[in-house]
Amino acid sequence: GYCFRFCYNSRNKGRRNSGTVLSVSELQNAKTALVKLVQAEAFPEDLKRLKKGFTVSSKSSLRLLSPFLDAEGLIRVGGRLRLSDTPYDVKHQVVLPGFHPFTRLLLKYYH
């Protein structure tokens, strides 16, 4: 989050953000960027196919999840839940690899 703030402040000299605490949007942007990096590392072929508009390979470990790319470029779970009235983030959860250090840290944080 602080790295993104530094980049923002470097580009926008007149509108600097100099608070000591990160805002919610800064934290969300940082988490999104980290998830993108982890997905690019863990699912490079699936990500490439989804960006081209194709479905994942029949040999992919994600094939049963009906994955798709959201507006931010994150791989999310598809499926029948799209018909439910639950919030978008609940219906279409972000896909993360099970044994990646980032996934473990995220689970530890939320648990």
Image (spheres, rainbow, N blue to C red):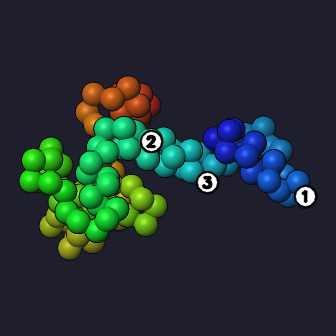
Disc 3 crowd, CA 10 A, few/some/many (<14, 14-19, 20+): few
Tell me the residue at 51%/46% (across/down): 33
Residue at 43% from the left image edge and 66% from the top image edge:
71
- Report which quarter residue 6 is drawn in: top right
- On the picture, is 45 further left or further right than 71? left
Q: Nearer the viewer, residue 60 or 74?
A: 60
The residue under label 1 is 14
Element at badge 3? Answer: helix
Badge 2 or badge 1: first in the primary sequence: 1
Residue depicted at x 41% and y 31%: 102
Name the spot of residue 31 as percent of width and height, x first: 51, 44
Q: Nearer the viewer, mark 3 or mark 2?
A: 2
Q: Nearer the viewer, residue 4 or 54?
A: 54
Q: Position of residue 37 (x, y in %)?
A: 44, 41
Q: Amino acid at mark 1?
A: Gly
Task: Identify whether 88 is placed above or below 59.
Answer: below
Q: Determine which quarter of the picture holds residue 88.
A: bottom left
